[in-house]
Image: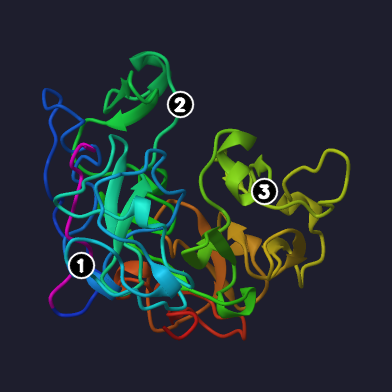
Amino acid sequence: MRSFAYLALAAAAAAGCGDSAAPTLPLDSERDASVDPDGGIFGDGSAGDGGSDGGSDGGPSPDGGLDGGLPDGGDGGMDGGAACNTSALCPSCPDPDLLCDEENPCSVGEVCLPTGCGDLARCFVIGAGACEIDADCGDPEYACNPSIKRCLRTAPGCTDSNDCVPGFACESNVCIDRRVPCQSGSDCPHGYACWFASPDQRFCRRMTRPCSDDLDCLALGVPCGDVEGDGLGECMPSLDPNSQDPVSCSNTQCTDEETPICEVTVDGTAAVCGRFGLCTSSGDCAVGFECRDLWGDARRECVLSAGSCVDSSDCVPREVCATPRAGGSPRCSAGASM
């Protein structure tokens, strides 16, 4: 039986805003991480189609205790017979061996979250890196779990979005669902690509996630670099992704004042010199643009002035504050229709 990590998930405020809720299920340094491996980092809120989390590989150990399966994309096969209704976020039914609920919890290092296919939830891998000993984790708020050889957070909350499953953002120390469903890259705003995390997860993923080396960007298929020269690493495609040893695009490579910064292409595989991308100040941007942190990870980007949101905390879960592909000022983007 898997160690229990089931959470009710994330719409952050009762009024329909994306303001972060207080962390749930706090985990202190003396508590066994196998009981609550996510450490209370996921926001509390609605489940089902609207819940919270963000698509990674499913759990490595299938649970044999689930009844039935998903014949012809039908019933979810849990004890309650939850229906599998596909959506733009969840285009195919999840593997029945990975489904989870309170009676079929997840392994250590995973969390049970809604998939977007009806009321079905499955196990998703939470953040943190590989390790052999605690010192490998490099942060006193993490400890190395010897059974899975991964760093697990021992303090409540999150430090950055790498503590969350892909598709979630760390906002006010809580992981909030920012999986924007997509069918192609054109459904995603600037700086995002339509990411097929698994057959049952397809959403817009922000490309410029924090990184310390190329390994952190392996899932995105791009190198790690310091795009805007502020000393912080982020994943970013190359201007020449087909070269033998592609390197991350740097704003120093973009010398035209009309297109002064690295911009991710619609498919996320390459960069071009454009107007929508990372910056340190408005002086890095084209005329009429300002430099703002829309994601909340201290990585600012060039956007047109004004707009209907300041950052993603102004948006409901499964929306992000970003610049639409069609252009204009930042607004809450919901991607493809569910």
Q: Nearer the viewer, residue 23 or 1?
A: 1
Residue 230 can be seen in this image: no
Q: Nearer the viewer, residue 170 or 75?
A: 75
Circles 3 and 2: CB distance less than 8 Å?
no
Q: Is residue 3 magenta?
A: yes
Query: Which of the 4 image quarters holds residue 148?
Result: top left
Q: Earlier in the sequence, mark 3 or mark 2?
A: 2
Query: Which of the 4 image quarters holds residue 272?
Result: bottom right
- x and y percentages locating residue 50 in the rendered image: 28, 73
Q: Which residue is mark 1?
A: 12
Tell me how far mark 2 sits from mark 1, CA to CA. Answer: 30 Å
Rendered residue at 44%/81% (across/down):
331
Q: Secondary structure at mark 1?
A: loop
Tell me how far mark 1 sits from mark 3, CA to CA. Answer: 31 Å
- x and y percentages locating residue 104 in the rendered image: 20, 48
Q: Which residue is mark 3?
A: 221
Rendered residue at 43%/21% (across/down):
131
Identify the magenta region. 1-14
Residue type, numbered disc 1 = Ala
Rendered residue at 76%/69% (across/down):
259
Residue type, numbered disc 3 = Gly
Rendered residue at 28%/47% (across/down):
111
Residue type, numbered disc 2 = Ala
Q: Earlier in the sequence, mark 2 or mark 1?
A: 1
